[in-house]
Image: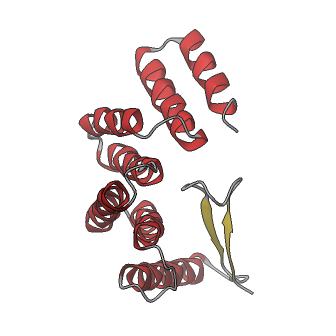
């Protein structure tokens, strides 16, 4: 049968992998049909989270969770509108976190917004989104998620420059927060 799972090292981090498997299929068209069905289910789930139909008392956290789902929809489908929705929800969440609890960090929302920017750079080849992600990560504080994203950005830069030593250093920095 089909299976849906969310794999994450730490449930408090706004990253992880949503994995959907299809039942056994007899051909490529059947695999594609099941994959598209999963994409539709994820899009509906994202809409449910956005509309507040998932019970979370903290609105800012709900917006971050919704952003995660919309980013996954964008990653799976390449849909620019879904990616814009993910970034917008993360931005709204950061604003709420700053207004409602100035003492607490908006880091989780800023990290989510940075991840949306990185995905946009990957999907659409917009290098300026890497710079935007770097700015957001700089604002996100020193959480494990922010440090891992900073290392990811460092690795991207080192790869673009072809600097193997810097790539290895970035890999070490990525492992350190985990």
Name the residue located 39 percent from the left edge and 44 percent from the top edge.
Answer: 118
Name the residue located 52 percent from the left edge and 85 percent from the top edge.
Answer: 55
Asked if 35 appears above or below 148 in the picture, the reply is: below
- Residue 168: x percent and y percent? 63, 18
Query: In the image shown, does 163 or 151 lie closer to the viewer?
Result: 151
* Residue 147 shown left or right of residue 85 in the figure: right
Asked if 170 appears above or below 175 in the picture, the reply is: above
- Residue 116: x percent and y percent? 38, 52
* Residue 115 shown left or right of residue 121 in the figure: right
- Residue 167: x percent and y percent? 56, 19
Q: Quadrant of the C terminus?
A: top right
Q: Where on the picture, by quarter, is residue 164?
A: top right
- Residue 7: x percent and y percent? 69, 62
Asked if 18 appears above or below 55 in the picture, the reply is: above
* Residue 91 shown left or right of residue 74 in the figure: left
Name the residue located 62 percent from the left edge and 58 percent from the top edge.
Answer: 12
Q: Where on the picture, by quarter, is residue 170?
A: top right
Query: In the image shown, does 148 or 42 lie closer to the viewer?
Result: 148
Q: Quadrant of the N terminus?
A: bottom right
Name the residue located 34 percent from the left edge and 47 percent from the top edge.
Answer: 117
Query: In the image shown, does 114 or 100 lie closer to the viewer?
Result: 100
Q: How is the image coloured?
A: secondary structure
Q: Where on the picture, by quarter, is residue 3?
A: bottom right
Asked if 102 appears above or below 63 in the picture, the reply is: above
């Amino acid at each position: 049968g089909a299976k849906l799972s969310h794999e994450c090292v730490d449930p408090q981090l706004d990253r992880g992998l949503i994995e959907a498997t299809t039942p056994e299929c007899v051909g490529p068209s059947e695999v594609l049909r099941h994959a598209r069905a999963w994409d539709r289910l994820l899009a509906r789930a994202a809409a449910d989270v956005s509309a507040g139909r998932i019970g979370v008392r903290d609105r800012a956290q709900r917006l971050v969770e919704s952003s995660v789902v919309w980013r996954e929809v964008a990653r799976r489908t390449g849909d620019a509108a879904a990616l814009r929705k993910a970034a917008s929800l993360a931005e709204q969440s950061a604003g709420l976190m700053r207004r409602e609890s100035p003492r607490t960090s908006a880091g989780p929302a800023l990290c989510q917004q940075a991840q949306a920017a990185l995905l946009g750079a990957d999907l659409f080849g917009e290098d300026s989104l890497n710079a935007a992600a770097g700015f957001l990560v700089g604002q996100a504080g020193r959480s494990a998620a922010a440090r891992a994203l900073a290392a990811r950005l460092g690795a991207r830069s080192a790869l673009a420059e072809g600097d193997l030593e810097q790539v290895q250093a970035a890999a070490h920095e990525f492992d350190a927060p985990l």
